[in-house]
């Protein structure tokens, strides 16, 4: 079983966004030593809770601070950008860190409608057109030098020109993204931590409809989920209170900073959730002591037929977050790197 990390660069109460970004770099260095497979950085706009709106910048720092772990985006929200510009950025990252760069691409805005408009080059349009499939095909053509000879873009010499390139993944949390990944013949990363209702159906649809491509001959999938590990189950549940409250705030359109466990537990005690939680096959966050948590994750991966899980962990204390990933690595017998 491979384990990877997706990092949203959370900002905790009492700290700054700069602290969150440096925490990302420190955690990536630890993950590299512990034997994690990948370290992906998310893209979010206009959210005080999450400090990274530009993963392509943070990837540069993380790749320079590590030696072996694959580093990438989880993901680049392609509708905001020119496919050529994204291709140039990630070819440059590939040139600096050959065979270690992943380009995870998403269709979601990574923010509210207001941020989406602010990011638009042409604001005369009253509706946001969804041309993601065309953008994706153009991006792949730039990366693979695959434009037909009669296409005007075939004359563009993308720089830096290097052998190989980033590994492209399609990200999503819906049946639409599962279908798109299958049609494009790309690896697929399902964001279970965002939407848990369609995890199994999306993974199964992706596999059953996968069309082999020049890029990938057989389906390849990752499931990204939340997990919090501590030395005891009680401590893990205490740490998880911060994430529970944070998710509640985000759902209400009030994304505050990550609260302390003490403040979170007080809020949960004084203001219980007005509605019962949505029952799904697998929870958004798995929480527990190492052996118990390992068994839950192995069972989930086995049921879904995936060989790699990508873990997001949001707690208030950065040291507790580092400890969570250390305990998971030990529980899964990851091979440490020198």
Image (cartoon, rainbow, N blue to C red):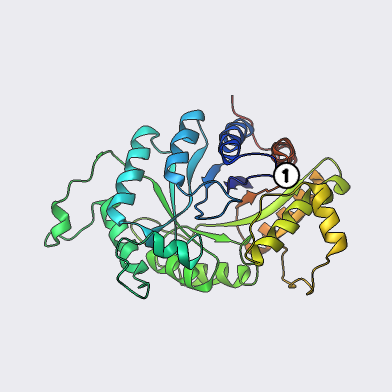
Q: Is residue 299 left or right of residue 1?
A: right
In the image, residue 171 above or below residue 235 = below
Count residues near mark 1 (Cα–Cα under 10 Å), then give few for <14, some for 14-19, many for 20+. Answer: many
Which residue is at 23% across, 51% downward? 145
Which residue is at 43% across, 69% downward? 180
Residue at which label 1 appears = 316
In the image, residue 38 above or below residue 268 = above
Determine which quarter of the picture holds residue 137: bottom left
In the image, residue 231 above or below residue 123 = above
Q: Position of residue 120 (x, y in %)?
A: 35, 62
Q: Which quarter of the rendering shows the C terminus?
A: top right
Res. 151 visible in picture:
yes
Q: Residue furthest left?
A: 150
Q: Position of residue 121 (x, y in %)?
A: 31, 60
Res. 295 visible in picture:
no
Q: Position of residue 235 (x, y in %)?
A: 85, 45
Q: Is residue 9 left or right of residue 167?
A: right
Q: Residue furthest top?
A: 338
**Depth check: 302 or 73 in front?**
73
């Amino acid at each position: 079983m491979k384990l990877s990390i997706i990092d949203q660069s959370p900002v905790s109460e009492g700290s700054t966004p700069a602290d969150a970004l440096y925490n990302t770099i420190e955690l990536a260095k630890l993950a590299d030593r512990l034997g994690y497979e990948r370290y992906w950085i998310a893209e979010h706009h206009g959210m005080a809770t999450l400090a990274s709106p530009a993963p392509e910048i943070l990837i540069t720092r993380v790749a320079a601070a590590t030696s072996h772990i694959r580093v990438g985006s989880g993901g680049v929200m392609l509708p905001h950008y020119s496919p050529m510009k994204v291709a140039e950025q990630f070819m440059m990252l590939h040139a600096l860190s050959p065979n270690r760069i992943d380009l995870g691409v998403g269709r979601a805005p990574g923010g509210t409608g207001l941020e989406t408009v602010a990011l638009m080059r042409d604001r005369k349009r009253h509706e946001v057109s969804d041309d993601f499939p065309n953008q994706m095909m153009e991006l792949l053509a730039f990366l693979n030098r695959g434009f037909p000879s009669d296409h005007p873009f075939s004359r563009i010499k993308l720089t830096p020109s290097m052998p190989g390139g980033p590994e492209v993944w399609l990200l999503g949390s819906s049946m639409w993204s599962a279908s798109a990944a299958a049609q494009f013949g790309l690896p697929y990363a399902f964001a279970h931590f965002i939407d848990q209702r369609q995890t199994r159906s999306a993974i199964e649809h992706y596999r059953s409809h996968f069309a082999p491509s020049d890029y990938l001959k057989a389906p390849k999938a990752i499931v990204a989920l939340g997990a919090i590990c501590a030395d005891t189950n009680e401590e893990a549940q205490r740490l998880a209170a911060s994430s529970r409250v944070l998710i509640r705030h985000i759902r209400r359109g009030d994304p505050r900073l990550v609260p302390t466990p003490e403040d979170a537990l007080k809020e949960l005690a004084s203001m219980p959730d007005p509605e019962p939680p949505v029952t799904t096959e697998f929870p958004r966050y798995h929480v527990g002591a190492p052996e118990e948590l390992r068994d839950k994750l192995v069972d989930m991966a086995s049921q879904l037929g995936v060989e790699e899980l990508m873990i997001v962990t949001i707690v208030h204390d950065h040291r507790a977050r580092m400890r969570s990933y250390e305990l998971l690595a030990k529980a899964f017998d990851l091979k440490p790197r020198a």
